[in-house]
Image (cartoon, helix red, strand yellow):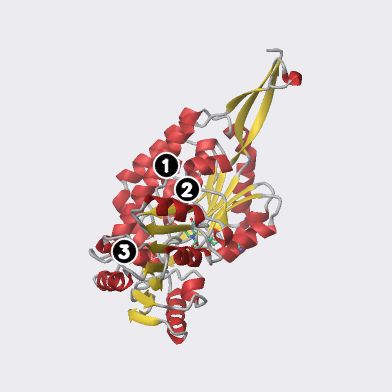
Amino acid sequence: MTTLSNSPSPFWVAGKPVTGGETVVVRHSFDGSEAGSHHVPSTSDIETAVQAAHDVSGEYATLPAHVRAGALDHVSRVLGERSEEIAQLITAESGKPLKWSRGEVGRAASTFRWAAEEARRFSGDLQRLDTDPGGTGRLALVRRVPKGPVLGITPFNFPLNLVAHKVAPAIAVGAPIVLKPAPATPLTALLLGEILAETGLPAGSWSILPVSNEESARLVSDPRLPVVSFTGSVPVGWGIRDSVPRKHVALELGGNAAVLVCPDWTDLDFAAQRIATFAMYQAGQSCISVQRVYAHAHIYEELQAKVLEQVRALGTGNPRADGVDVGPLINTAAASRVESWIASAVEAGGELLTGGKRDGATVEPTVLANVPEDASVMADEVFGPVVSITRVESVEDGVRRINDSRFGLQAGVFTRDLPTAFDVSAKLRVGGVLVGDVPSFRADQMPYGGVKDSGVGREGPASAMADFTEERVTVLTGL
Ligand code: NAD
């Protein structure tokens, strides 16, 4: 086992562990302690992995569905069996509080399980062609076949489950995958390699390469990897898409998720608890963290007081300790940027209701009110434990402000009024709307993704499987 051991983790080339050469130490952002280390692929290791993916792709696509589903079920089961060890590793390398790391392992097990189920029912279509005289006696068999090997690139904030969202659908459709994990959190992905190696999937069908951003950019431009599935920041994602216009590039990027609390919503304790928890969840380092709250004037004062009370009750500190809700950010530079954005919001006229201070990589859970819409904490992605509450005079005003953003991942609306729920859901320009909840909910089987700067394409096993494949038509004649 590589977990928290002293020996550097191997990386994985064509399903085989590789050691030797340079090693890199991964540090815990809370106290700088060593989370582990790993070997670094050489140029020739990268070449071997990419060529192997290319070489295996035709044959791999014909692997029976029951074999692919069985492999996915195996991964799901072992993630469950090794969940505590893996959760400890996620916390060690990401600084995420243990309770959230445990939740992430459970979610990843479910992502693999869903992919197994989808692999069993993933099929094609039969189309009759005799709707016009020229098609008489003909029938089209429409199958979905992999577009080719997938390059999966993942961010630091969910080191396991976002890797699962690339690897599991690729296995489910029989597309080889080269996975490039985030430099801050590669160890969990490398540990997943141990479990994948037990599945007996064909050599070449998967590789895990913890390489630099420069090497990652080279992989993006490699013609042997025609599909790029990227989760990460807005500028990097769109830069990738612009650099390879002829490739299929799916982007799961950032946002400044908002929630609207309508005047009819009476359970303000519930709304405040959800807002406080999911503004500060993972120290705000989630792409659907609650960043903007628009509260109707009718409930604004009471909601604000309740959110403050809930935020002040959160436990902050060492993410390894029980009872800690909010740990450090991924590094001190990120925390220092968040601190400066809070200061700018206050300079611009926003009220600081609680928090605002930084200690190393840890930022206090922070609540601001009535911040101008063009301040960074409103207009950009904070990716820190900061939420801004703004009074709105009408539901329409709230919808307008939510939409007045360059992002569009998910949004929440607290209402019990069905016509309002439908109307607001129809008007919000986002990938998903949560009615009666904050925007931060994601079930791993549902279609998930954004519009505008937040990305293009949808994840979730079924959506990603459709994305990694294309239709191939066989026309049967003389029937
Ligand atoms: P990032 O963009 O800095 O890095 C993401 C990945 O891209 C890393 O593996 C990195 O090494 C790689 N990379 C960086 N430059 C590259 C280049 N030029 N070419 C190829 N690869 C390159 O993002 P991050 O800081 O790791 O993650 C945080 C971001 O991810 C936030 O914006 C967050 O909103 C977003 N995110 C989105 C989702 C979603 O599903 N929409 C989920 C989680 C995180």
Task: Label 3, secondary structure: give it.
Answer: helix
Residue 99 placement: quadrant = bottom left
Residue marked by disc 3: 277
The location of residue 145, given as percent across then percent down, is 61, 34
Q: Name the side, left or right, on which 153 lies relative to 140.
A: left
Disc 3 beta carbon < 8 A from ligand 1?
no
How busy is the neighbourhood of tag 1: few (under 14 within 10 Å), some, or many (20 plus)? many
Q: Secondary structure at mark 2?
A: helix
In the displayed structure, 175 sits above or below 208; it is above
The mark nearer the N terminus, 2 or 3, is: 2
Q: Residue at 36% x, 81% y: name it.
A: 352
- Residue 347 drawn at (x, y percent): 45, 87
Which residue, given by chain and number where applicable, does mark 2 sit on?
165
Which one is closest to the eye, mark 1 or mark 3?
3
The amino acid type found where label 1 is placed reads Phe
The answer to whether 107 is drawn above or below residue 376 in the figure is above
Residue 103 appears in the picture as rendered: yes
The image shows residue 95 at horizontal and vertical percentages of 36, 66
Which class describes the residues within 10 Å of circle 3: few (<14), some (14-19), or many (20+)? many
Identify which residue is drawn at 67% across, 52% down: 222
Which disc, if any, is residue 76? none
Residue 466 against residue 45 in the figure, above or below: above
Q: Amino acid at mark 2?
A: His
Where 57 sits versus 150, above or below? above
Residue 129 picture quarter? top right
Q: Is mark 2 within 8 Å of ligand 1?
A: yes
The answer for how far apart the CA atoms under marks 1 and 3 are is 27 Å
Q: Is mark 1 within 8 Å of ligand 1?
A: no
Residue indicated by mark 1: 112
Marks 1 and 3, the one that precedes in the sequence: 1
